[in-house]
Amino acid sequence: MTSKSSFLVNLKENSKRRLWVWVISALVFMLVFPVMTAIVISQINNSAPYLSTAYTGEALERFLHGKLIAAMREQLGFFSARIIAVLGIAVISAVQGFSYLYSRKKMDFYMGMPVKRKKRFLVIWLNGILIYVLPALIGILIEILIAAGNGAMDRSVLGCAAFAFLADFWLYLGVYHLALLAVMMTGNVIITGFGIVVFFLYEYVVRWTLNGYKSFFFRYFNYYNVRTEPVLSPVSLFSNITSAFMGEKVTDFKSLAMLILFSVITGAIVYVCYVRRPAEAAGRAMAFDMTKPAIKVLLAVPASLLAGLVIAEMVGYDPMSSSDGMGYMIFVILAVVVIGSALIQVIYEFDLKGALHKKREIIISGMIAALVFVIFQFDLLGFDAYVPEPEQVESIAFIPQNYEQNTAYFDEEGNYLSEEEFADRYMYLHNVEEVCELARHSIEGYDQIGFDFQRSYDEEKEGRWSESTVLYRLKNGRTVCRRLLVNVDDEQTIGLLDRIIGSREFKEGYMTGVSAQLQNLIGEDEHYKIKANYGNTVYRKEMSRTEAAEFLEIYREEVSKANFTNIRENMPEGALHIQISEEIPGSVGDYEKLTRSWYVNINIYSFYEECLDYLRTRGYYMDYQLNPEDVAYIQIMNRNNEIYQKLTQEASDMPAGAEAAAVIDRDYESDLDTRVYAEYTGKEEIEQIAACCYPEEMIGYYDWDKGLEAENDYWIYVYFNTDSPLTKSYGISASYRFLKGQVPAFVAEDTRYQE
Amino acid sequence: MIEIKNVTKSYDRIKAVDDVSVTIRENTVFGLIGTNGAGKSTVLRMVAGVLKQESGEITVDGKPVFDNIEVKRNIYFIADEPYFFANSNAMDMQKYLSSVYPDFAVTDFYNYLMNFGLDKKRKINTYSKGMKKQLALICGVCSGTKYLLCDETFDGLDPVMRQGIKSIFASEMERRGMTPVIASHNLRELEDICDHVGLLHKGGVLLSRDLEDMKCNIQKVQCVFKATEDESKAISALDIMKNEKRGSLNVLTVRGSKAEIMAIFATVNTIFFEALPLSLEEIFISETEVVGYDIKKLILG
């Protein structure tokens, strides 16, 4: 008789109780996905006639096979629909399997049966896993057979399917256990639903709120390296695994190990909760009384802080400039603490009258929320004032925001990086005293002028401030990131920037042209395709790969001459543009293989004498930005901004009356158009203009250092001769700009606005 | 034997069972009586191992019951609202119960179903409330357990069915020493079935006695004394629990055996004397009134 009540018999019996979940799982994994796979294969095979123009014979077959393999890798790998199904079945299986815990009737029946609690748990738990594992495995097998039958299978697809199933399994287990935890901690299905939502979103919301507070209250908060996705989430860990596998084609063992650990630990907690769960919890909101106050506080505090933040944004509260709106924020925080706590208490008791029970918990929540608010409002932890002592710092990365433009950052494998990520990885400034001094000096200066979105700054008196990011790598292993605003007109700052930006470490960790990665990619003859040219975006001369590599070699040596001041004070003579591209291994597009490219732009200044010598020797050097010989005519538009603003100001200042109405009418009829055009066809005029204008794209680069800037009023449209080679290589016209203070007098005269 | 010693159980800080001690002997029908909220169901659920007591001890045949499979194999608990699997029929229930109760009597189960006119293939959710109770009782009886715990199970059963169940209980008790424990709020319902009765009130036990003992120890006498001296003499000699006087007729509820009381009455002169049988209700009324409770309010409504 013992065999009758064996584990397997119980498993079979349990399966009968949850047949519908089995059916759903089987339908999804054993029918829907195999059918989808068959459809994908059929669609690719049917695309053969459209490809026959580009490919024939064996090439076509190879291409189609490649497409099929790529499609199967996606289909059997981390297919988003499959992941959604895994999540859905995990939650359904967890809630349905242990739903008897919600019903006193069922509890009386099951708990009265001579079955060990441990055994019952194991049976239902295991059944919940088998509900996913068996249909999914069978479904994958069916899909593999379909793919193999259609020649869409190879070892890589099998590997992909196996790894995806492994990761999916641990995702399933993690989500399953998290949902089970919600079941164990609650007493009815609606509260379980809330619990599941809370478990999945809580860390997101808390992180989002805290980061929001940092961003809102701290002027030197920087979002770089700020973790927004939760650590304690199977979905987030799984997402890391898929990103690494799909993107970098590597296994993220750390996230996989964490996912496994997460699943095992939550599983253990679930078991403990199950064993300790009182039968009388059936039907109540929460199964364990001791968790009620903690859960209430943990929900009410972030909710109130988040509501406070939303209101603060809505009423335009700016903690850095005034206290207007702070009252609203405090009121909403406290109101939400009370309302939230009351709501949770009502849910606990299923009774509206219980709203204000447990006042002590409301007070504790209010105090915690208030404490958090005070910490942020008055920066009690000294976030904004933080600058480490140089002896605490191992190295620093200083990242001026968009100092170099139109240049890609990438690592050794060619993976794209942001400039912060690039500097984080490759910039190790050891002149930490200077960076710390720059930080301290800049914070002091910027704090003095205050931070206020409501007013415009007097650049003459207050200076021009540029944004940067500083990463302090401390000796204790921590990395602290801060936003830093530097006054690029301040003498001390300029001196420090010269030494920081002029250092070799800065250039290696910020300028792609100096990086070893670029050298490596160019050195790879076979795999990477290189296109290089030198020019000023309008005029360009193609360079061979060898020449580009040679030129880069010289540049790397000579870049030591560059510092903040000389880059700021000079316009580049031209720039070396390098395009590196590769066919993405294993990728197949709709009609051809997919490629990816990196663009690198290296500015060449007059102080790079050896670089310029090389260019001259090889015939790439251009001693002009615009060759008058190529120009048919030039059109210049002067916006006369100052006059326009003056006139509009006059219109708005004027008292209501006929005169004001006249001005407004003129504006309405577009009479208040201060733009004045002039066209130049004469050789002499064209030569004078060509001598002092730069292609628009070149001038646009220089923002961060507030160096040479374009004259905002003037827009130059250059129209080329029809027989000029530029017409073919660039187009019939190009936009140029004057630098500030370099507008030829005759142009200024010709385009002056006259009423 | 089921022994409940100083057991306490609370729900949300409200004591449902407070320091209850009761002993349920084997091969008797034990009736657990009490008003709604008296703690009957809680006691039964604890005995069945569904709930765990906060303090005190519950043993079945000397062993603790909670999460003890060995002990639970000897207990079948029929809750006040019996649960059956969704969309199941009697055969499905039999299959499941056979897998967990090693001594489940399959043949008896189907015989009982036939005798009670229950269709084994009909879905249980289409059964009437009474039919579900019958099926739950059949499941319990056929489980082969020594103890059958019934929580308000006789509610909703028609008299014929009740009689049928009683005869099944009798035969099972005789055949294999089954011990039914029946909780009810209705004293009259248990009168003709219980051997022993425990009265619960507000979570505590008011009394727990053998019915026979109670019946033998309390007598009801109607008499008319010849003279006042006779009346005084008899009353002083008797352990009177209640004395109602209607004119010259005395209706006395007296503690003591029939022989003892007859001997006392033999020493006085009476014009009329008659010993009357006591109903369970009357015994309870007498016993609880002595302790200061109005039993009519408690369980007779």
Image (cartoon, helix red, strand yellow):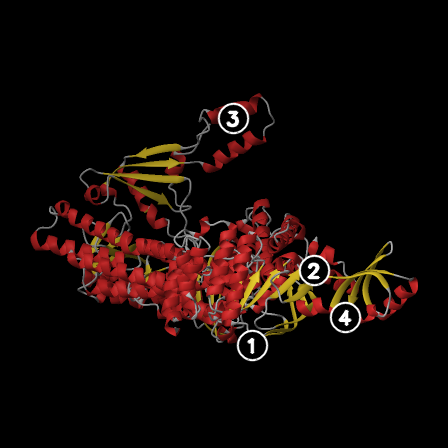
Disc 1 residue crowd, few under 14, some 14–19, many 20+, Cα 10 Å: some
Which quadrant would residue A50 be assigned to in this image?
top left
Q: Disc 4 designates what residue?
A: B256
| Disc 3 secondary structure class | helix
Q: Give the Cα distance between marks 4 and 1.
A: 33 Å
| Disc 4 secondary structure class | loop
Q: Disc 2 designates what residue?
A: B279
Disc 4 residue crowd, few under 14, some 14–19, many 20+, Cα 10 Å: some
The answer to whether residue A701 is left or right of residue A663 is left
Tell me the mark number nearer the camera, choosing from 4 and 1.
4
| Disc 1 secondary structure class | loop
Residue type, mark 3 in image? Ile
The reply to whether the C-beta atoms of the residues labelled 3 and 4 are less than 8 Å apart is no
| Disc 2 secondary structure class | loop
Do dots 3 and 1 share one subunit?
A: no
Q: Earlier in the sequence, mark 4 or mark 1?
A: 1
The disc placed on residue A664 is 3
Q: Give the Cα distance between marks 3 and 4.
A: 118 Å
Report x, y in % for residue A196.
Answer: 48, 57
Q: Nearer the viewer, residue A213 or A285?
A: A285
Disc 3 residue crowd, few under 14, some 14–19, many 20+, Cα 10 Å: some
Q: Give the Cα distance between marks 3 and 1.
A: 103 Å
Q: Nearer the viewer, residue A222 or B4?
A: B4
Instruction: Give the residue at x 77% y 68%.
Output: B255
The reply to whether the C-beta atoms of the residues labelled 3 and 1 are less than 8 Å apart is no
Report x, y in % for residue B80.
Answer: 56, 57
Q: Disc 1 designates what residue?
A: B61
Which quadrant would residue B100 be assigned to in this image?
bottom left
